[in-house]
Image (tube, rainbow, N blue to C red):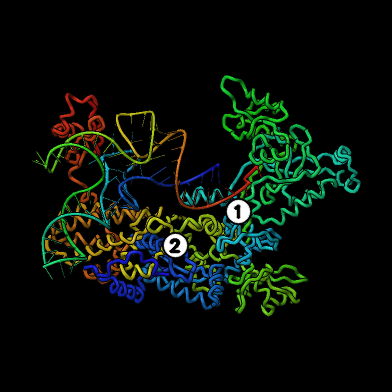
RNA sequence: GCCCGGGUGGCGGAAUUGGUAGACGCAGGGGACUCAAAAUCCCCCGACAGGCGACUGUCUUGCGGGUUCGAGUCCCGCCCUGGGCACCA
């Protein structure tokens, strides 16, 4: 497998520079022995928590994408340390979950044996990469000392009514034999194995995240996160402002008579008025609502269906139930059935038919809609299929032709000739809408809502697309949900002192297609006595979602040494919220949203003094390889071990940061690493041959201070590629004209490179006679006076065309610049007389208009 | 369909946010060193046209318009591409 990554076998010959393997081994041992990377959590000054997304320890080992993420974070953390912060950079392992379990099944080794092995391999690789990680605070989500508190969090939510159980249609993967979250279903297929997903009904535990939708959305306005991540969360939460409108079902017997069907059995029910609530974002189009549609699962469907329509409705509902959730969403051909009943449009008082159709989803809004085929594409399609009336109540105002006259005439027609719905809202006006005719959509929206509300038919409402979070998994490799079912007491939470509910060792943990967790086969484990009454009871046999494990791990890191509390209040106060979090945007919605939710709940429960866990979040980009996506099947996956072996961790790290803008990602090219290695080799050579007598050249020192400024500005902005480029540029100046560099010219460069290439920096720092780590030496400051150029170069344009450049003293004004420019023949030959106008941009250019 | 990114030399990518387009690096060419090769060091390197010549001119940031003294950068209309969401009323 790994051989495939050697596309072009690189030259085996050793470059003439430094020897990374001995230096890196030496310093990694030294850091460990001297505790260089350990954080003084109680005594340090200016605490800075630099968090990276913990990896799931796959058997394949560390992915280069992980290292790209971690290195970027490490540089940020090291830079903060060099700026005088006490930096905490912990790392752990997200080792529960389907990934690990499926792999264990595949290779036939129990995850209890497999996971520690993988973790050891990961830790080895991570240490080799030279990260400033404090390994004393390592954690694994599979450790009972950790998941005890994952279960505790579940109970906290349960206590607050935020965890509940309901029978729900779930996505079922027939191959992995498990329920999938909607997010794990990609285009109707399981995101892991690609199998077609089906629908099943199971009792599931949910977290009421929808209750927090408003806050989760609102806080996005002030947290310092990548804009792309915030946008993704906003879309995911999906707020829409609209109205809930009530339609009264038309008196039953009146309809029954007309339909000549005897309805004696249900006639009593119709004595009670039946109301249907619909959600709409376009209450202004109510005059065009020509029918209602309910989701097939809507509870009112039974009541509304007439005997005559019963059979057809039942068949349709049965079909809808059989279909999996996903294909129901993917299949866009409109189908539906008439219930036989009518409702009254509260705006027009006209009776309109009530249909059921699977394009209306029970999970969103009220599970019912008013259909306005004239102004909604889905309703339009549906109306076309079933020949339902299409009424246009909004039209563009045509210049000159008066108000939508053509629409008026067309509406008199039985079959409106317009072949599409009119969905514009801008520059659109109402027609056929009684007293509202002529209003713009913008004006009509509040007016009609208010008018309906006055008569008790509507209220303004906010709707969210976000669904509650289904956290049960019918799987083995996760923390058992700490609930006990007792026949007498019902659902009983496991008392806190009985936590953790340990996951038992189960030899055969393979899920089967009963939809029941493997734990349900272990009677010795699930048969317990009720904690409340002592009667025979049964444990919940589902485990919780991996995303719950990862929704709070950052709270645990500082407190890993406590067993009697999930997170110590004093340490939490001191270290949280996280100062800087860097990770991939693939977690923009799930992990990051769930973490925010859990933090908010814990805050509301009085456990945390803050409600947002990550003050600052930045999404890094993706790395591709030689222009193509990396994948196992392509055989083009970068194995970090091989590259670190060949080039050294310092070179590898620096190259990863140099190959493209960190927040956008880049293209990993084997050939290009050479350049970074050459740069470090030159640094090494220059450092070893420095002279200590005399002083550095002013010209070189000027460039040095400009470089210090550039790197100091770039690092906090994560602009690592240009920071490296700036140091390379300085290297050129340093080594120009075969001069021997002075120690004052090199020493600060060693500090500047140290976040990128920590080992070589430590080695050189030591060779320069320091006995403490370069990471305790602070950051070089730049002197603006030293960095300033005496001369400035002005671009000289004539009529906007570049005709030359001119070097003038820094404080030269327009007059001086002009005469200097005109002194150049290359310029003056284009300037016949006095320029008509002169544009002077200090420090930039001079543009002469002639 | 909707929402975000992104289109710059042979390649990866820079560009002070409207001011000398192509920094830095790779690859390539030439030279020095060497018996030779590798490594190392130095020089050249967007395209086209003219000249023996250190040069001179023209063009050039996906396409078409516009604003401006000046546009890779701003505005309008397209094309291509990567990612996310998708019957959400």
Residue A580 visible in the picture: no
Residue A311 visible in the picture: yes
Q: Residues within 10 Å of mark 1 (few under 14, many from 20)?
A: some
Label 1 to label 2: alpha-carbon separation: 42 Å
Work out whether B16 lies above or below A547: above
N-term-proximal mark, 1 vs 2 = 1
Give the labeled residue for mark 1: A212
The picture quadrant where one finds residue A126 is bottom left
Chain letter for the residue marked with disc 2 in the picture: A
The picture places residue A566, in percent across and down from the top left corner, at 54, 69
Q: Which mark is residue A558?
A: none
The picture quadrant where one finds residue A547 is bottom right
Give the labeled residue for mark 2: A634
Q: Pick the quarter of the image with the C terminus of chain A.
A: top left
A130 and B25: which is toward the camera: B25
The picture places residue A370, in percent across and down from the top left corner, at 71, 40
Q: Decide if residue A305 is on the left or right side of residue B21.
A: right
B58 and A778: which is toward the camera: B58
């Amino acid at each position: 497998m790994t051989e495939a990554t050697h596309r072009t076998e690189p030259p085996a010959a050793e470059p003439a520079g430094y020897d990374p393997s001995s230096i890196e081994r030496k310093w990694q041992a030294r850091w460990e022995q001297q505790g260089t990377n350990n954080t003084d959590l109680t005594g340090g000054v200016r605490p800075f928590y630099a968090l990276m997304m913990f990896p799931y320890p796959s058997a394949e080992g560390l992915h280069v994408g992980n290292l790209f993420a971690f290195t970027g974070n490490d540089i940020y953390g090291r830079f903060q340390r060099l700026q005088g912060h006490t930096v905490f950079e912990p790392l752990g392992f997200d080792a529960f979950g389907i990934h690990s379990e499926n792999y264990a099944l595949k290779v036939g080794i129990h995850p209890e044996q497999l996971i520690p092995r993988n973790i050891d391999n990961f830790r080895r690789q991570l240490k080799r990469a030279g990260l400033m990680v404090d390994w004393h605070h390592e954690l694994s989500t599979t450790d009972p000392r950790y998941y005890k508190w994952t279960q505790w969090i579940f109970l906290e939510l349960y206590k607050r009514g935020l965890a509940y159980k309901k029978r729900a249609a779930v996505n079922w993967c027939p191959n992995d034999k498990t329920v999938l979250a909607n997010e794990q279903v990609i285009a109707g297929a399981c995101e892991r194995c690609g199998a077609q997903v089906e629908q099943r009904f199971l009792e599931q535990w949910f977290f009421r995240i929808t209750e927090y939708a408003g806050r989760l959305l609102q806080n996005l306005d002030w947290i310092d996160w990548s804009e792309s991540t915030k946008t993704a969360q906003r879309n995911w939460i999906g707020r829409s402002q609209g109205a809930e409108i009530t339609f009264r079902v038309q008196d039953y017997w009146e309809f029954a008579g007309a339909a000549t069907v005897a309805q004696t059995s249900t006639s009593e029910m119709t004595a009670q008025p039946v109301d249907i609530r619909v959600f709409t974002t376009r209450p202004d189009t109510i005059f065009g609502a020509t029918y209602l549609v309910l989701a097939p699962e809507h509870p009112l469907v039974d009541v509304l269906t007439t005997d005559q329509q019963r059979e057809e409705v039942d068949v349709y509902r049965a079909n809808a139930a059989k279909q999996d959730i996903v294909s129901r969403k993917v299949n866009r051909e409109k189908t539906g059935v008439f219930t036989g009943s009518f409702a009254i449009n509260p705006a027009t008082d006209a009776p309109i038919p009530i249909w059921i159709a699977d394009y209306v989803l029970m999970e969103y809004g009220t599970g019912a809609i008013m259909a306005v085929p004239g102004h909604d594409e889905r309703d339009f399609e549906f109306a076309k299929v079933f020949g339902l009336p299409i009424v246009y109540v909004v039209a563009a105002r045509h210049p000159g032709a008066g108000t939508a006259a053509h629409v008026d005439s067309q509406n008199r027609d039985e079959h409106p000739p317009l072949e599409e719905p009119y969905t514009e809202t801008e520059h659109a006006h109402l027609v056929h809408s009684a007293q509202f005719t002529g209003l713009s959509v913008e004006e009509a929206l509040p007016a009609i809502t208010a008018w309906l509300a006055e008569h008790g038919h509507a209220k303004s409402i906010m709707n969210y697309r976000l669904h509650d979070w289904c956290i049960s998994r019918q799987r083995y490799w996760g923390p058992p949900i700490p609930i006990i079912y007792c026949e007498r007491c019902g659902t009983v939470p496991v008392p806190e002192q009985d936590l953790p509910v340990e996951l038992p060792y189960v030899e055969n943990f393979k899920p089967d297609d009963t939809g029941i967790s493997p734990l349900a086969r272990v009677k010795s484990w699930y048969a317990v006595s009720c904690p409340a009454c002592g009667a025979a009871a049964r444990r919940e046999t589902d485990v919780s979602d991996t995303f719950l494990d990862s929704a709070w791990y950052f709270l645990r890191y500082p407190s890993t040494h406590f067993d009697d509390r999930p997170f110590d209040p004093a340490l939490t106060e001191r270290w949280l919220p996280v100062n800087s979090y860097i990770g991939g945007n693939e977690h923009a919605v799930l992990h990051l949203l769930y973490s925010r939710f859990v933090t908010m709940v814990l805050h509301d429960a009085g456990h945390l003094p803050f409600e947002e866990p990550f003050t600052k979040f930045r999404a890094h980009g993706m790395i591709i390889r030689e222009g193509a996506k990396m994948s196992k099947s392509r055989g083009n996956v970068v194995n970090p071990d091989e590259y670190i072996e060949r080039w050294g961790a310092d070179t590898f790290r620096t190259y990863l940061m140099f190959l493209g803008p960190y927040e956008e990602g880049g293209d990993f090219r084997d050939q290009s690493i050479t350049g970074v290695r050459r740069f470090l080799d030159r640094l090494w050579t220059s450092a070893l041959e420095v002279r200590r007598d005399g002083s550095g050249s002013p010209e070189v020192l000027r460039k040095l201070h400009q470089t210090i400024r550039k790197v100091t500005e770039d690092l906090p902005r994560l602009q690592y590629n240009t920071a490296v480029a700036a140091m390379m540029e300085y290297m050129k100046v340093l080594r120009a004209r075969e001069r021997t560099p002075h120690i004052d010219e090199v020493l600060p460069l060693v500090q500047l490179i140290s976040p990128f290439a920590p080992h070589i920096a430590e080695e050189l720092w030591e060779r320069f006679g320091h006995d403490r780590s370069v990471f305790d030496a602070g950051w070089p400051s730049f002197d603006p006076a030293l960095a300033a150029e005496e001369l400035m170069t002005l671009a000289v344009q004539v009529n906007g065309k570049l005709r030359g450049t001119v070097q003038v003293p820094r404080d030269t004004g327009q007059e001086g610049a002009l005469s200097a420019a005109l002194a150049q023949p290359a310029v003056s030959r284009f300037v016949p007389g006095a320029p008509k106008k002169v544009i002077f941009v200090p420090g930039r250019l001079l543009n002469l208009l002639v």
